[in-house]
């Protein structure tokens, strides 16, 4: 299977930027897509961005034009560049790896945007 390690969360002022990283180890060849989700207090977990093994990307409407998902295959790492952050982006962000056989989650990283 795959193990995921996230990093890059923190506290930032509104309008600022953060870059999250998700590094995969193990059977990375089996991954079909890497997805970033987020969960704010009292809310359901929501899909933020997707990158497939073919480098297709997709975004939630709420982050389009502000967030960019990308990968560095040499490092088995997927990034989520978050610009123009808003207080409503505050959440725990989770990396998720999907294959035909499993769905694997990272431990989550907190992003807090102050107004």
Image (spheres, rainbow, N blue to C red):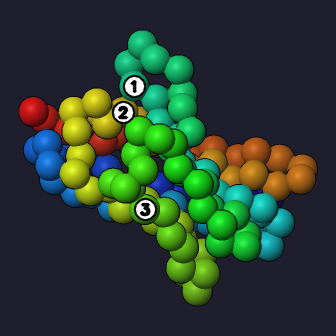
- Helix, strand or loop status at disc 2: strand
Q: Is residue 114 visible?
A: yes
Q: Residues within 10 Å of mark 1 (few under 14, many from 20)?
A: some
The residue where tag 3 is placed is 68
Please identify, in this view, whether the residue under mark 2 or under mark 3 is nearer the observer: 3
Which residue is under mark 1? 40
**Residue located farthest toward the right when viewing the structure as drawn:** 101
- Say if mark 1 contacts mark 2, CB within 8 Å: yes
Is residue 7 visible to us here? no
- In the image, residue 54 sits, relative to residue 14, either above or below, namely below
Label 1 SS = loop
Residue at the disc numbered 2? 91
Position of residue 30 measured from the top left corner of the image (x, y, whole percent): 83, 66
> In which image quadrant can residue 7 be found?
bottom left
- First of labels 1, 2 by sequence position: 1
Position in image of residue 76 (x %, y %)? 60, 75
Q: Is residue 32 left or right of residue 39?
A: right
Rendered residue at 90%/50% (across/down): 101
Q: Are dots 2 and 3 in contact, CB under 8 Å?
A: no
Separation of residues labelled 3 and 1 (CA atoms):
20 Å
Mark 3 neighbour class, 10 Å CA radius: few under 14, some 14 to 19, many 20 or more:
some
Locate residue 2, reporting x and y percent.
73, 59
Q: Is residue 55 left or right of residue 66?
A: right
Question: Could you tell me how far apart the alpha carbons at marks 1 and 2 are, in whole angstroms?
Answer: 4 Å
């Amino acid at each position: 299977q795959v193990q995921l390690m996230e990093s890059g969360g923190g506290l930032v002022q509104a309008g600022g930027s953060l870059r999250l990283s998700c590094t995969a180890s193990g059977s990375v060849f089996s991954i079909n897509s890497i997805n970033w989700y987020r969960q704010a207090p009292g809310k359901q977990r929501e899909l933020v961005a997707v990158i497939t093994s073919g480098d297709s990307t997709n975004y939630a409407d709420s982050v389009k034009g502000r967030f960019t998902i990308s990968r560095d295959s040499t490092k088995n790492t997927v990034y989520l560049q978050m610009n123009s952050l808003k207080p409503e982006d505050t959440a725990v962000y989770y990396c998720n790896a999907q294959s035909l056989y499993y769905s694997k989650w990272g431990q989550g990283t907190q992003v807090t945007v102050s107004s």
